[in-house]
Amino acid sequence: MRAVRLVDAHQLELLELADPEAAPGQIVLRVDGCGICGSDLTSYKVGLFTGTVPGHELAGVIEAVGDGVAGWSVGDPAVVDPKIPCGACEDCRAGASYRCAMALTAGIGFARDGGFAELVAVPAALLHRLPSALAIENACLVEPLSVAIHGVERARLHRGGPVVVIGLGPIGLFTVAVLRARGAGTIVGVDPVADRQRIALELGATTAVTELREVRSHIAPTPAVIECSGYAPLLHAAADLVAPGGRLVLVGVPFGEATVIPLMWVTRETEIIGSIASDESDFAASLEMLAADPGIARVATRRISLNQVPEVFEELITPSSGGKVIVDPRL
């Protein structure tokens, strides 16, 4: 089979690998589509998880079924929740296995080969059935949409309330869609890329601006600001947009350092809330949401072949247009 492997920082290689086999408890999935995530780009830039096939936002059709797998057959469409928690850590014991360090690093597309390939071996326990109304070509969007749902849940918004979304990459765009579906009032999106602003408005944003300093001219400090860019230097300015007693939810993953003045967080009683991945209820809600509103799939603006992956990764480091890019191994 053809696959793309991360060899080193800024080095992805298209190569031929042996077809995976379905070990006991596993299935082999023929990949229909696998989204490129911001975490994939981070791994690419720093050389994290080298030697493996990236891609954790994947869906496809079952090609083979291993011994001991019940309820699944060859030809069944399925979407993968890529997390493989350890089952023994404090988070797993507390019912928050999605936060488990192993779940975030050892799953499909991280330490284990993922979906930037024609075929991938997956533990059957990670599979979810597609609702009849959810098209297979949109199913790879379930995982990133579930991340946005989790972030909105963490924001604890009141229906009809205003909110600011910083960063209109795919997760930010999905966040806008979730906010609109859940009855948010004024939604202001912030992103320097005009094409992303356009998509955000189509998904239900009230206003889209280029820079944070423009937000105050459209909306007063809000009970919730959801930061989806992961750009650490924005942290202080983002917190300054939060109304007293409100929440700044960090959905984007900031790897860099940030300079902040926490005095205002204390005097305003601002809550700084992290949000990582998604739990089982978020994943189920994502399946239902995509099935009920296929228009959300407009976040995906491009499908590329495996041989285009290396060049597109370089383009996405500084994107100038578009939303989610889907790798389609069938092309």
Image: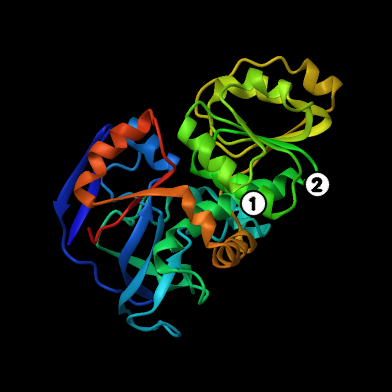
At label 1, the amino acid type is: Val
Q: Position of residue 122 (x, y in %)?
A: 37, 67
Q: Position of residue 276 (x, y in %)?
A: 58, 45
Position of 54 relative to 77 (above/below): above
Q: Are marks 1 and 2 in contact (CB under 8 Å)?
A: no
At label 2, the amino acid type is: Gly
Which residue in the protein does label 2 denote? 160
Which quarter of the figure has residue 232? top right
Q: Residues within 10 Å of mark 2 (few under 14, many from 20)?
A: some
In-image side of 184 versus 253 (left or right): right
User: Gap in Å between the C-alphas at discs 1 and 2?
Assistant: 13 Å
Position of 260 relative to 25 (above/below): above
Quadrant location of the C terminus in the rendered image: bottom left
Q: Position of residue 90 (x, y in %)?
A: 63, 52
Which residue is located at x 72 percent, y 26 percent? 218
In-image side of 2 versus 221 (left or right): left
Looking at the image, the residue that sits furthest to the left is 16
Nearer-the-camera pick, 252 or 326: 326
Nearer-the-camera pick, 267 or 243: 243
Task: Label 1: state its secondary structure.
Answer: helix
Mark with earlier residue (1, 2): 2
Which residue is located at x 50 percent, y 26 percent? 192
Q: Position of residue 223 (x, y in %)?
A: 80, 35
In-image side of 323 versus 95 (left or right): left
Q: Is residue 258 something that shows in the picture?
A: yes
Task: Label 2: state its secondary structure.
Answer: loop
Position of 251 relative to 216 (above/below): below
Which residue in the protein does label 1 denote? 178
Q: Residues within 10 Å of mark 1 (few under 14, many from 20)?
A: many
